[in-house]
Image: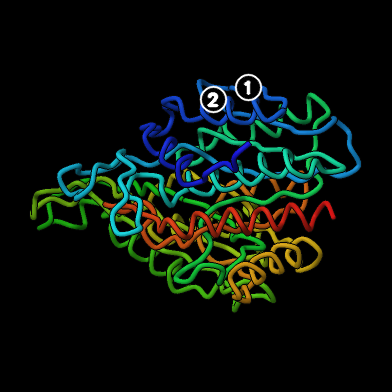
Amino acid sequence: MSPVDPVDLTAQLVRCPSVTPDDAGALDILHDLLGDAGFTCAWANRGGIRNLFARWGSQGNTRSFGFNGHTDVVPIGDESAWTMPPFGADIKDGVMYGRGTTDMKSGVAAFAAAAVDFVRETPPDGSIVIAITGDEEGDALDGTTALLAYMEENGERMDVCLVGEPTCPDTMGEMIKIGRRGSMTVKFRVIGKQGHSAYPHRANNPLPAMMRMMDRLATHEMDQGTEHFDASTLAVVTVDTGNPASNVIPAECRATVNIRFNDSHSGASLSEWIENEVAAIREEFGVQVETEIKISGESFITPPGALSDLVSRAVEGVTGVTSALSTTGGTSDARFVKSHCPVVEFGLVGQSMHQVDEHVRVDHIHELKAIYSRILTDYFA
């Protein structure tokens, strides 16, 4: 059989307009490809989201290598701003254009192609698990978590896992992610008393309270970084009263902050800090303060070792580049996988992800398949 062309497979996936939560047939393409190659495929659907589980080899084999990725994509935005069709997968000057080309249909295609060729040519002594979700770009409530729940219920497992998210800032091969910062968002509502701006003593302006609170949070040094993480950050992302009148003191004010935190903190410890700051503002200004805290994920680290060495050797062998081990960037579904098994991330250059005219170099797709093939070969050697 001819090797699976990862560029053609990427194009097939990109032509499916799979904006979360609509799968648009992308997972069916993978289901058919993997099933024809001898993978046992099952659906782990939940909450209206389609998720594909595929395993080659017998359940309970002594070694099981896992791959996690997603086929859902973010919306295209203003279609008129695109110079190429957003779901066309058109190739121009060695570059494929389309939503999801970088994040992360090329990564999924490269690993699926590598895995199919690998089991056909050199059937391994062990199992390969491929877990692909249609809910990574959304709230991620029924995606990889549903796949992991399915695995636990059915006695499936991965000994190690590779997540195929774009990890390289500028150059193919330059970065492997061995962890991620935690993420939480806090929404505040400060409630005072509305009044005339000429008679402020008859009102209780919520704005000074909110501004004091935002200043205290934003200027607080959370930490100075840890061995594997940069310093934690807190960003004030919006403050709003919705007040169009210059002679009215508003009744309330709202604000939102986003925190990216390292392993010096937990969601619980940061929530306690926030609540203590809120209590101080309530007492100082005599206002009501409501909070809504959403923890998207805790920080985690897979310490440098056998798994990161495996991936690093494969990357250097194919590209000649020595990868940096990093914990930078936003969140990914690795935050869920880390509770199941050791996990690292490696994928494409991510410069254009989520942008208009998202694109990927065709030679990078072939290169990524070669890297994933080398990882499988070395893991099962």
Residue 50 shows which numbered tag? 2
Q: Position of residue 78 (x, y in %)?
A: 20, 44
Q: Is residue 330 above or below residue 27?
A: below
Residue 39: quarter of image = top right
Mark 1 crowd level (few <14, some 14–19, many ≥20, 10 Å Cα): some
Secondary structure under tag 1 reads strand
Mark 2 crowd level (few <14, some 14–19, many ≥20, 10 Å Cα): many
Q: Quadrant of the C terminus?
A: bottom right
Q: Position of residue 51 (x, y in %)?
A: 58, 28
Residue drawn at point x = 53 percent, y = 75 percent: 221
Front position in the image: 101 or 351: 101
Residue 46: quarter of image = top right
Task: Residue at the far right: name it.
Answer: 62
Q: Is residue 76 above or below residue 235?
A: above
Q: Give yes or no for contact between labels 2 and 1 (Cβ–Cβ under 8 Å).
A: yes
Residue drawn at point x = 48 percent, y = 48 percent: 106
Front position in the image: 175 or 112: 112
Q: Position of residue 92 (x, y in %)?
A: 28, 54
Q: Is residue 224 left or right of residue 126?
A: left
Residue drawn at point x = 62 percent, y = 50 percent: 163
Q: Position of residue 121 (x, y in %)?
A: 74, 43
Q: Amino acid at mark 1?
A: Trp
Q: Is residue 196 left or right of residue 145?
A: left
Mark 2–mark 1 Cα distance, whole angstroms, equals 7 Å
Q: Earlier in the sequence, mark 2 or mark 1?
A: 1
Q: Is residue 169 above or below residue 337?
A: below
- Residue that numbered label 1 is attached to: 43
Q: Is residue 152 left or right of residue 281?
A: right
Residue 347: quarter of image = bottom right
Secondary structure under tag 2 reads loop
Q: Amino acid at mark 2?
A: Arg
